[in-house]
Image (spheres, helix red, strand yellow):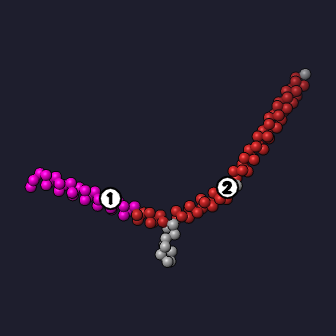
Amino acid sequence: MNTMVLLTLISVVGAAALFLVLAWYLLHIIAELERIGGERKAYGAPASYLSKIRLGVRAIEVQTGGLAPQVTKLNAGLAAILGGVRAIDANLGGVIAAVSRQEDR
């Protein structure tokens, strides 16, 4: 047998083996994805877990959509409260210092 024919034959067999292994893996991937897709209903259509997750995430997004403006208002209110709490802290520091001075006398 000619060397060129032998190398061609080996290349064809190698390419065929590659495509067979690729097809085998793709079939296993498809089977796994169908399993993730969910159980089959009585009429044969699968209930997709992925679509259920998508609907749940969408529901969460819709229900929490109004939080952003409220959080902005809350942050503004808390910033105002922060100034008051700092003033109270400074006053309490003064009170503690005054009481300490009276105890030392």
- Point out the image quarter for the C terminus: top right
* Residue 46 placement, left or right of 66: left
Specify the segment rendered in magenta.
Answer: 1-29
Label 2 and label 1: CA atoms lie apart by 45 Å
* Residue 48 placement, left or right of 104: left
Whether residue 96 is visible to the viewer of this picture, yes or no, is: no
Is 20 within the magenta?
yes
> Where 102 falls versus 27 (above or below)?
above
Q: Residue 67, image x and y in percent? A: 70, 53
Q: Residue 43, image x and y in percent? A: 49, 77
Q: Residue furthest top?
A: 105
Q: Residue at x 32, y 58 (%)?
A: 22
Helix, strand or loop under label 1: helix
Q: Residue at x 60, y 61 (%)?
A: 56
Q: Nearer the viewer, mark 2 or mark 1?
A: 2
Q: Residue 87, image x and y in percent? A: 82, 34
Q: Earlier in the sequence, mark 2 or mark 1?
A: 1
Helix, strand or loop under label 2: loop
Is 14 within the magenta?
yes
Label 1: how many residues lie within 10 Å, few (<14), some (14-19) or many (20+)? Answer: few
> Where 92 falls versus 65 (above or below)?
above
Nearest the camera: 94 or 23?
A: 23
Whether residue 97 is visible to the viewer of this picture, yes or no, is: yes
Q: Which residue is mark 1?
A: 22
Q: Residue furthest left?
A: 1
Q: Residue at x 82, y 31 (%)?
A: 90
Report the amino acid beneath label 1. Answer: Leu
Question: Secondary structure of the magenta portion, mostly?
Answer: helix
Q: Which residue is mark 2?
A: 65
